[in-house]
Image (spheres, coloured by chain):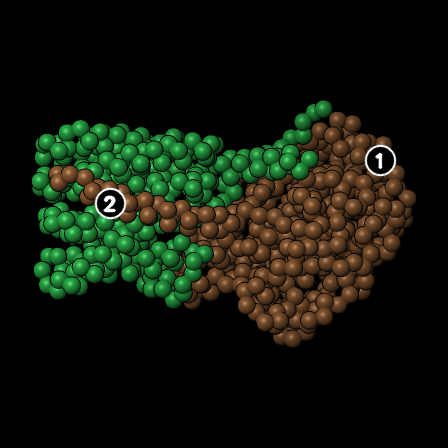
Chain colours: A brown, B green
Amino acid sequence: MPGGGVWSAQPARPGPVPVDPVPVDQVLQRATSTDPGPVGPGSVGPGSVGLGPVGPGSVGLGPVGPGSVGLGSVGPGSVGPGSVGPGPAARVRQDAEAMDPAAASGYLDPPARVGFFTDTSICIGCKACEVACKEWNGVPEDGLCLTGMSYDNTGGLSADTWRHVAFIEQRVPHGADRPDASAAASAGGAAAAGGDRGAGEAQGAVPIEGQLVVPRVAQGSTPVQGQQAVPAEAQGAAPVVAQPGLRWLMASDVCKHCTRAACLDVCPTGALFRTEFGTVVVQQDVCNGCGYCIPACPFGVIGQRSGDGRAWKCTLCYDRLTVGMEPACAKACPTQSIQFGVLDELRERADRRLVDLHRAGVSDARLYGRNPADGVGGGGAFMLLLDEPEVYGLPPDPVVTTADLAAMWRRVALAATALAAAGVAAFAGRRR
Amino acid sequence: MVPVATFDSYYGRPVIKSPVWRSPDIPGYLFLGGLAGASSVLGAGASLTGRPALARVAKVSSALSTALGGVALVHDLGRPARFLNMLRVVKPTSPMNVGSWILSTYGAATAVAAGTDVTGLFPRVARVSTVSAAVLGPFLASYTGALLADTAVPAWHDGHREMPFVFAASGAAAAGGLGMLAAPLAQTGPARRMAVIGGTCELAALVAMRRRMGLTAEPYRDGRAGSYTRAAEVLGLVGTAGAAIAGRRSRAVAAACGLALLTGSAATRWAVFHAGLQSAADPRYTVEPQRRRLAAHHHIVA
């Protein structure tokens, strides 16, 4: 582990979460070598459990190449909106995945693209990510106040908040009233097979007979267990419920490091640039504070720092990446809700997680920003959500604004020509 | 089936960030750029057809507007001392970058054109700079449409097809208006015709834009932007009609119509500016069109 003096590379994390998804040095080793290494279950680090064969319906979960995990082809329940790309998804996705933003930006033989997979189903809203980000990056204070709306006190991403933990309290119908109750019941049969997880796991949460299941829960059960199919990272905390019919959603949001990044496109100075890791970073010694990137971002990520005038956002800890360390937020996350790694591997891991959740009856689970065929070419940082994106303050169908730029330039040229023609016409008439 | 409790936003907070651009800097620049760019067309025509007074008004006003607009732009930067960083790259994906190249080359041309006109020096340089300014000017007047539209701001992006026409026409109305206001009646014929063409097209393009936008046109009707829109419509209509009917006969009427068109053109920019801010502040304008797009897409796929 080069340069690992300040932050220990040891995953010395207390608590019930057993797995470091992929040791960071391994990730970056892979990221910096041309050989992508083994993919699929075998690539998960030591100590991983539950990544074996996944039982019936586990089509496409073996060690498969990037892009070949078609979400449409997997087991029951994989019908969540947002998870399946538009049109002939598999083909589009494969084409899109061939687009490596670092290579497209002119890097010769860049390392593998890295990113975040934020699994909000196991976020506990602790905000360690927010704090670690501020500490590491020297991000100034963003207002010592309470929003008054929830346990969220940062409100949203901004120049001074590069990780933001959203907090949503919802009243939900329960029991048989739930629209997905029947799906949960049918998924229960398959999921009930595996059971014994030993101590440290709560009792009796096997989803059967229309009971509420992971992670939209009630009746005090701790979700996600009792299933052989659940991968290691699925273990652990899920959104906690205070009383029946109520649920908390927590989600750590971050810059998406889009494949097609509007902020980068519109930046007039070249201050925003694509790194060799495929991430998007502001060069603060170049930024002149024009503010163009700010309304260009379809996610509302980047902001202007008051008193400074320049635009700031998440760098995906570019400094740490270059010395082989994982970003501070992922390092600090106690539940591995924030997972850092090679993007292709994260996408596969997310696909497996989605299948597991759907099989467990969580039909609300969907991946957001996973699809390379979406309007921003997919995010370098993507998420697993348990409700519609807008509930978390995310746009449901973001499109990079420069997708229409060619049409805009044509219109500009036409309008300019029309103006010149109007001038000619104005002088073509009579003398006065 | 009991509907699941949902929010259609995160506590009503906006999805996208509002532009940090300020008034009067940015709408002022949009107005001044349009006025300058179209005035250069008028100035070149006036020079070529022997209307020295109109040429003087057009050239001097375009040089002054450009200078003032440039100052407004630099003033709006978070780091004004770094304004030259815009010119360290050439970047067609950034309308602001392209605009700073247009502005700097056009600005040089229009300054020389005005300087040579006032001093009478270097007639050949005067001709070259006058024609150069007239060629670049229309792009200065219309690129700002792409500048605003190339963002995630719903009331701007959704108008991307018409915005360059709105701004070019609005620039023509303003330049014609200024000519009518400041030049002697004997030479204002072309200014008046440009004002009528510009004023008519501006109103038509605004209507067409809002009609096609649908939901995201609402901010143009509401609140502060709504007031500016109505002002732009009334002033544009009065100025255009007055110029067409009586602008040829009376100096006073011509001046009044010219002033109406100038302020109407400015009101158009402030309307667009505030409509953008209002649409960015309300998550509905971001979420609902995207939801509809998804639904339509799924419908097609299914």
Q: Quadrant of residue A8?
A: bottom right
Classify residue B69 as left or right of residue A155.
left
Residue A45 position by quadrant:
bottom right
The spot of residue B73 in percent (x, y) is 31, 54
Residue A144 in view of the camera:
no
Q: Mark 1 falls within which chain?
A: A
Give the CA separation, mark 1 to mark 2: 72 Å
Q: Is residue A290 above or below residue B38?
A: below
Can you name the residue that lies furthest to the top here?
A: B1
* Total marks in image: 2
Q: Earlier in the sequence, mark 1 or mark 2?
A: 1
Q: Amino acid at mark 2?
A: Gly
Picture quadrant where residue A101 is located: bottom right
Quarter of the N terminus of chain B within the rendering: top right
Q: Which residue is mark 1?
A: A186
Q: Residue at x 54, y 60 (%)?
A: A280
Q: Residue at x 20, y 42 (%)?
A: A428
Q: Secondary structure at mark 1?
A: helix
Give the residue pinned by disc 2: A423
Give the chain letter at badge 2: A
Residue A16 locus on image (x, y percent): 78, 54
Closest to the observer, A238 or A112: A112
Residue type at tag 1: Ser
Q: Nearer the viewer, mark 1 or mark 2?
A: 2
Q: Percent position (x, y) of residue A420?
A: 28, 47
Q: Is residue B116 left or right of residue A187?
A: left
Q: Residues within 10 Å of mark 2 (few under 14, many from 20)?
A: many
